[in-house]
Image: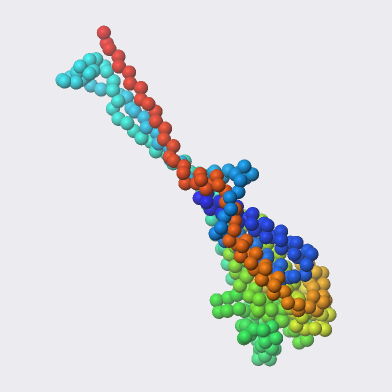
Amino acid sequence: MSAILQIVIANGLVALGIAAVAILLGRYTRWHRLTHFIWLLALAKLCIPALVEFPVSSAALPTIAPMADQEIVTAHAIVTDVAPVAGRNAHEFPDRHAKRPQAVIQHRETKRSPWWYLLAAWAVGSCALCVWMVTSHMKFLRSLALSEPGDSLRREIAEHAKAAGLRQPPRLQLTNRKVSPFVLASVHGALLVLPTWLLDRFSASQRRPLVLHEMIHLRRKDHLVRVFESAVLILFWWNPLAWFVSSRLRHVEELCCDLRVAQALPGQEAVYANALLDAAAIMSQSGKPLPALASGVIRSQALRERLETIFQGNATGRRSRKPVFAVAGLIALCLLLVGPRFANSRQEAGTQQPKITYSKPQIRYSLDR
């Protein structure tokens, strides 16, 4: 079990370094796609063990105690009175009141390591979070009261899907609940849900960038990222780094989609910005939050940064960054395969022997003179 603890600590340290690189990229550059890739790499590193390890000095790190159980065996003798000894053995016990050991009893006691209790708490927390996510997701879908759209809206969605580069439009459902337009992964494929307030209060030209935003989410496979992200959060619910990386990953996804929409609709940055602000204002009035597996266009967090990305979308341009992504991919592969190794932990793991304590029986012979 100490090997599992070593892998968790090593992956956490490497993921922390990757997250620091992503923070610097997001702060000093506008390479949103590369930043998103680095954040996704940090999330993946939490659960991918290293194949190539380099030793770490044990003096700089605390020693990881072994998680093996300790078996304590105590052997003791019971000394009791016996009957007078006669016959050929009488010379060995000349006194009738002599005492000799009657039996040797071994008492075995297993001392459970404290790490097992932490492992049990880890498993219970993961199961509880998984049940909560699944039940809240199903409850949210049941509360939407989904309905089928009309043919004209289907044709409009098909045009947006073609503009986003999708081979075929996703499944479309409508709801009268006050929620943000969102996409999510389902058993039958990707699902796009549009609220009726978007159709009633926005014209076709106003809702076009909002719908295109969701199509780009599908083009980027962000709905599948939500599934992987939820699995990592269930597994590492106790790790603050996992929750921080998850929040930053969602934020950078919105910036990537905003940039793609601004580049796909040149000259309509103001229309997109106004539609985004109007939709955010509507959602701020008792809007229903989305579940963990959904990717929505309207998020009130960091709207200022999103508006800056929309108006600077064409300024960043479509410059080719293939060499940058090639180098980043090579570095990412190295970071996924490399990790530290704690020498003391691995040497001590599995070498704990059962602790055996013997109590030497004391036998006294007395002669009755």
Residue 316 visible within the image: yes
Looking at this view, is 58 or 200 the one in front?
58
Q: Quadrant of residue 206?
A: bottom right
* Of the pair 18 and 272, the residue shown nearer to us: 18
Residue 95 found in image quarter? top left
* Horizontal and vertical percent position of residue 80: 30, 24
Kindly identify the residue that appears in the image at 37 percent across and 26 percent down. 360
Q: Position of residue 320 (x, y in %)?
A: 73, 77
**Residue 361 to residue 5: above or below:** above
Classify 56 as above or below 196: above
**Residue visible at 77% across and 70% down?**
30
Residue found at the far top of this picture? 369
Q: Residue at x 62, y 55 (%)?
A: 12
What residue lies at 67% left-to-right and 57% top-to-bottom? Answer: 16
* Residue 126 visible in the shown view: no
Q: Horizontal placement of 254 versus 142: left or right? A: right
Where is residue 336, by image quadrant?
A: bottom right
